[in-house]
Image (cartoon, grey):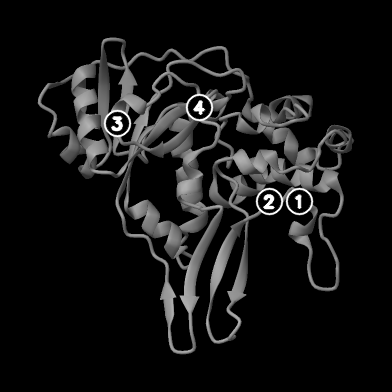
Amino acid sequence: MKYTVSKNEVKNFLDKLSASGNLIAPVRENSLVKFKKIANPDEIEFDYINSKYSIKKYFLLDKEVLFEYDKDSIKENIEEKQRIFFGIRPCDVHSLLVMDKLLLEEGMEDIYYKNKRKNSLIFALKCSKSGENCFCRSLGTDDLKEGYDLLFYDEGNYYIVKTGSEKGDNFISKLEEKQETEDEPSDPLENQKKLSQDQIEKLRESFNSDIWKKESAICFSCAGCTTTCPTCGCFDVKDDPDLDFESGKRIRLDASCQLKNYTGVAGGHVFRDERSKRFKHRIYHKFKYFVDQYGSEMCIGCGRCITNCPANIDMVKILNKL
């Protein structure tokens, strides 16, 4: 269903949600936009391209205690609290759909991620303009057909709101000033970087191209790209025993395929010891390996890896060179 809703009504709606203590939305702090828990809807930043970091950190924590144990029992750290995310861009909702394929695959479900997803409502906000490094339209992630509870389109004086789930229907039913509509929302995105499927297909014949060593020569292997990427989910797991060796905890830590020690194994061997191998692996994983396994690109076209790279490496330019 689609509705038109006044901006004043949406503000009142967000005011009630923030009072519940469960609302997480974009906030501008200095020059950066980040997602934080909201106590007052006036804190919400509506006019932004995208946040510095995605909402991935709320689903795959940088550091997370998976369970604690002693000699008699194991206590899992399963999060049950409901959360409402407002203002997520469509590309970032697509990133959650990507992570769902990785972490909710039948027989291999990540119970920690699964519970966070189950207890999260997604209220997305369509972009009103493109950033200089956005290429979501090339990947079809600029709009949504699934993965959201409510989707807001800013039409100037009002919003068009689409419902995408039964939970979304329940929330929209509480709004008093709304009207059903058949109008299609406007589509203002333009001037994006371009990436075609033909260019992506070139990867299949370019594995040994000299371009990889040439382009990776300026890479610092700092992992800035994977740290800010909303679909990079590499992690490490470590046990932290107490001094009595009868109790302790197991911890999951954020990691990166761009760090040399990530593929290190017993005996000191490192499978991707050369920077060019790690550099190439990230792009192949996004545009080939994941496609072969799941049928869609892992990249969502948000451009964060380009924006946040200290060496100004541009993945779109590299694919176009191929």
Q: Which residue is mark 2?
A: 256
Tell me the residue that label 3 is attached to: 40
**Is residue 18 rendered to the left or right of residue 217?**
left
User: Given this view, does label 3 or label 1 mark the residue nearer the observer?
Assistant: 3
Q: Is residue 182 visible?
A: no
The residue under label 4 is which amino acid type? Asn
**Category of crowding for the residue at label 3, using alpha-carbon neighbours closer than 10 angstroms: few (below 14), some (14–19), many (at least 20):** some
Residue 310 image point, x, y percent: 74, 30
> Is the C-beta separation of discs 2 and 1 under 8 Å?
yes
Q: Is residue 160 left or right of residue 175?
A: right
Find residue 135 and report its image quarter.
Answer: top right
Identify which residue is drawn at 75% across, 26% down: 312
* Circle 4 residue: 50
What is the x, y in percent for residue 153? 33, 21
Query: Residue lying farthest front?
Result: 243
Residue 259's label in the rendered image is 1
Q: Earlier in the sequence, mark 4 or mark 2?
A: 4
Q: Secondary structure at mark 2?
A: loop
Q: Nearer the viewer, residue 42 or 90?
A: 42
Mark before the other along the chain sequence, 2 or 3: 3
> Could you tell me how far apart the alpha carbons at marks 4 and 2 are, in whole angstroms?
22 Å
- Most foreground residue, 28 or 113: 28
Mark 2: amino acid? Ser
Gap in angstroms between the C-alphas marked 4 and 3: 21 Å
**CA gap, disc 3 and disc 1:** 40 Å
Residue 124 location in percent, x, y? 36, 32
Q: Earlier in the sequence, mark 4 or mark 3?
A: 3
Q: Marks 2 and 1, how far apart in space?
A: 6 Å
Residue 321 visible in rendering: yes
